[in-house]
Amino acid sequence: MFYLASKSKSTGIIKIEALEIMEFLLHEFAGFLKKDQILDDPVDLKLYETDATSLFPKKPKLVLLPGTVEEIQKIIKAITRYNASNPPHKVSFVARGAGTGLSGGALASDYSIIISLARFTKVIKVDYENNVVLVETGVVNATLNKVVKDSNLHFAPDPSSQQACTIGGNVAENAGGVHCFKYGVTSEHVLGIEMVSSDGELKYFGDLDSDLNYNLSSSDLNITALVVGSEGTFGIVTKALLRLTPLQDSFLTIQAAFEDTQACANLVSDIIKQGFKPAAIETVDNNAVRAINKAYNLGFSDDVKAVILIEIDGILEEVIEDGLKLKDTVNKYNPLQYEETQDPERRLRLWKVRKGAAAAFGKIAPFWYLYDLVVPRSKIPDALKGLEEIADKYNLLLANILHAGDGNIHPNFLYDPYKDETVVERIHKASHEIMELCVSLNGTLSGEHGIGVEKQEYMGHLFSDTDMNKMLMLREVFDPNYISNPNKIFPIRICRECHREIEMEELKS
Amino acid sequence: MLNEKHAHINLEEEIEKINACVHCGYCLPACPTYLSTGNEGNSPRGRLYLIKDLIRDGKEELEDTAKNYLDNCLGCMACETACPSGVEYTDLLEFARHDREQSKYHKGFWGFIRRQAFKYILPNRLLLNMARISLRVMNFIYKLLPFLPRLVKIQPKLEFEYKKIETDSFYPSLENLDGIDNPEHTVILNLGCVMDTIYNQVHLDTIKVLNAIGYHVYVPSSKCCGALASHSGEHALGEKQKQDFLKKQKTTIDGIPVNKVVFNSAGCGAFIKESEDLDPELELYDIAELLDINNWKAPLPLANFKKKIEVADSRLMSFFGEIDASDEMSVDITYHPACHLSHAQGIRGVYEEILKLMQRVNLKTLYEAEVCCGSAGFYNLIKPDLADDIGKRKAENIQNTEAKFVVTANPGCMSQIEAHLPDDYEVVHPMTLLAAVLT
Ligand SMILES: Cc1cc2nc3c(=O)[nH]c(=O)nc-3n(C[C@H](O)[C@H](O)[C@H](O)COP(=O)(O)OP(=O)(O)OC[C@H]3O[C@@H](n4cnc5c(N)ncnc54)[C@H](O)[C@@H]3O)c2cc1C
Ligand code: SF4
Ligand code: SF4
């Protein structure tokens, strides 16, 4: 069952009956996919209308659950054949991992088929000699880490969502995590890639070749680095060769609570100025502390306005020595509460204040809307002040979480549209000002969650049309027909320019 | 939306519960039905998204596809363990299933048959035994004629003999311990329904183990606790069976009341523990809680227990069929935690700790250990295909450990896992293993 398409506002595609397109394609898909791999019931389409964001639901036309790379190739070839013989129709496809994305990257566009990687969960080969692993991209980040943990190794990028997000999603969004301050984000840990490109052919980049052998010293043009972070717009990444990092012998986790956010921000600058290289520096402020305290009974007093978490790791002597110095530094800023631990269980408890943050927001309001700003570290205090002013102006409940070490701020608005009818509109207005604030502080729009649909219209604040067109040209090299996760990242206006045929159609209609 | 059927439900409360779900997806990899199908509708997040329609958006009734997704849920509660936001998934699902009288499993011929089975077979030892024998006959036929279509994808091996256990009887501990006469040291053990029929040996072993750690055991003439009926949506029947069951949970010795009740079937324990109207004097334990070496409660001193376990080399080896085992020989074992133990009661690590004490046992890490095996009450009967997929996945993970012995503490898990493993594997209840080691 399909919905009839009406004229789409965003791309201006003329009225076509989605029914016809999909019936044709469905027939093709049924030739090589089983019934339970093709989801076309309205209930199913609704289930895939969103990822972890909630502001831009959009139902796909179809959802497919392939089980093999060949099936993905066949799907994309069928789409390509259809598009070639029926201009100007453009059926597109969108890869979906676990749908934990926060920028709407895995959502459908107007004529999109979602291709889920949920069945690609094999860890193909762990090479303990070279500390690399070859995985299918539907493998969950934390699952991979469980597999290699016994050998004292880990895949270092550790987004807070690691218990659910997939390697494919990490690669597409160039995910970061609390320990990436020291270890680097995903791009630094991907050595090679197998990708089904938008013509349905298999491509191999980096150290991986078509026999799935790898040559760890390959020195070609680093195309892997381009694919990482391309948000699924170059094709569907089906396998990834990843670097594994040895786990450190010891660690020390410090948690300190402060009465004012400024002290906390200054402390961060101080730590970095002094040349410490902690594995993580994270802070959580005001309403966020309140929410988390309430959710997990962490016992912070009401005066606490900011909590900082600092973790150092390495060999024991080093950790102890640095730990002592860090303690002195932290105490200079008069914390209300201070705790340090080397006990793994206690460490988890201390981390709760950070890792449990997002989920705890559910206790305050059913929805949260999160931004992913990066500003120069020295501008963090200005950014926090500006954010507070914007929240006040629009009467919004603001909670900030910061990867303070690299200036990555996650402001969150907590809201309940069922109780407050105009809140979504106010958030949209506030978003605009937040983006402007960020740009005025020489910041960027996304640290780790990607641009997706969420921030595409703000790209123009940061990049000129010329710059964006250059990026699009790069994209065209990989996806000349513009069918792999289209209408994301770049403002729709720009997307349309590259989408010339459709523009023509639009002119006609 | 809400109608008369939901009259007793407080909508505000339900809204608050559903609001706690922030759609983060953290629960996806914990869910057996999602792992097996990769379908969002078969994930906790997906199910909650559908339930949201009922609670928040005023939908009258769910579509058939949606109902089917809810019906696919095993009720294993792994999602509640995984959820950082504390979503009360089970309650919300229960709410949505209130419309279930309309679901096909509750209607028509099969619904009727099911209800009769819950009502008459489960509480009746004679009928249960007949069912057990017919399962055996079916197994035998399957073995002779392997090409026959399977009616039921469950074939417990049923290899041990059925030995009747007298009810309303005492089984005293013969351990020579200080204060052994203290009535506090008596526990009540219920025979239940499925366990006694299919794994009756486990009861005998449980009594041995309890006696060995210094407890006297009283076995009342109780019947099915109602968990199976309730978990299948037959709430009224389940409630009645539970009340009858609870009436049997009290006895006295020399005028002193005995109120410690022990369960060796995690499903029953979890179900009874969550009752709202329990007699406050009743103390409910899963047998694992009495064997927790980090929180030892039994009359036998912990040091003695540990010693017995550590030195039980030759007994252990002969239990595993390694009769002439040389001194260096050891045996690989893996452990599958029953959902009703880990997710429902939060009891973890007890048996692993004991297995680690056994010097000649290598405890092999089971991948996806806390993922349900697909047994879940009568799930195999209602959703045979999905139960089979989930069972196969569990079996594959077990085979990857290279251990040939699987320890698990719930009759449902035992039969489901047995059914999916090759013949040379053995599934053992921890009581059976411990009875062999301790006595
Ligand atoms: C509570 C919470 C906390 C989070 N914390 C962090 C954090 O600390 N750091 C961080 O970086 N992110 C974080 N995220 C965001 C998110 O988890 C990451 O972006 C993650 O990498 C997405 O993975 P996924 O498998 O869910 O991808 P999805 O959401 O399914 O997809 C995300 C994008 O990747 C594309 N994609 C997915 N798989 C493939 C593939 N195989 N080939 C090509 N394209 C593909 C999709 O098309 C889409 O554009 C958080 C999210 C939540 C809900
Ligand atoms: S149930 Fe919990 S873990 Fe699952 S999506 Fe909702 S909030 Fe996240
Ligand atoms: S109870 Fe088990 S099967 Fe049901 S949604 Fe939760 S994890 Fe999945």
Image: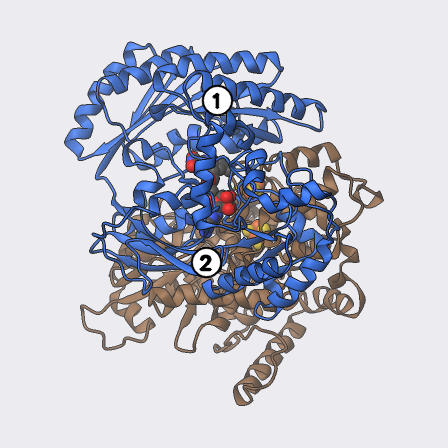
Chain colours: A blue, B brown
Earlier residue among tags 2 and 1: 2
Q: CA distance from mark 2 to mark 1?
A: 35 Å
x and y, in percent, of residue B299 in the image? 39, 49
Residue nearest the viewer, comparing B19 with A262: A262
Callout 2–callout 1 Cβ contact below 8 Å:
no
**Residue beneath disc 1:** A400
Identify whether A473 is placed above or below B359: above
The numbered mark at residue A120 is 2
The chain carrying label 1 is A
Amino acid tagged 1: Asn
x and y, in percent, of residue B106 in the image? 76, 61
Q: Is mark 2 within 8 Å of ligand 1?
A: yes
Could you tell me how many numbered marks the image carries? 2
The chain carrying label 2 is A
Amino acid tagged 2: Phe
Question: Which residue reaches farthest bottom?
Answer: B144
User: Which residue is at a point 71% across and 54% down the rendered structure image?
Assistant: A18
Q: Is residue B176 left or right of residue B373?
A: left
x and y, in percent, of residue A470 in the image? 43, 37
Mark 1, other Cα within 10 Å: few <14 / some 14–19 / many ≥20: many
2 or 1: mark nearer the eye: 2
Q: Is residue B275 visible?
A: no
Q: Quadrant of residue B113?
A: bottom right
User: Which residue is at a point 70% across and 23% down the rendered structure image?
Assistant: A420
In which quadrant is the N terminus of chain B drawn?
top right
User: Which residue is at a point 25% across and 17% down the rendered structure image?
Assistant: A273
Identify whether A383 is placed above or below A5: above
Residue nearest the viewer, comparing A8 with B377: A8
**Quadrant location, ligand no. 2:** top right
Q: Is residue B229 left or right of residue A246?
A: right
Identify whether A10 is placed above or below A147: above
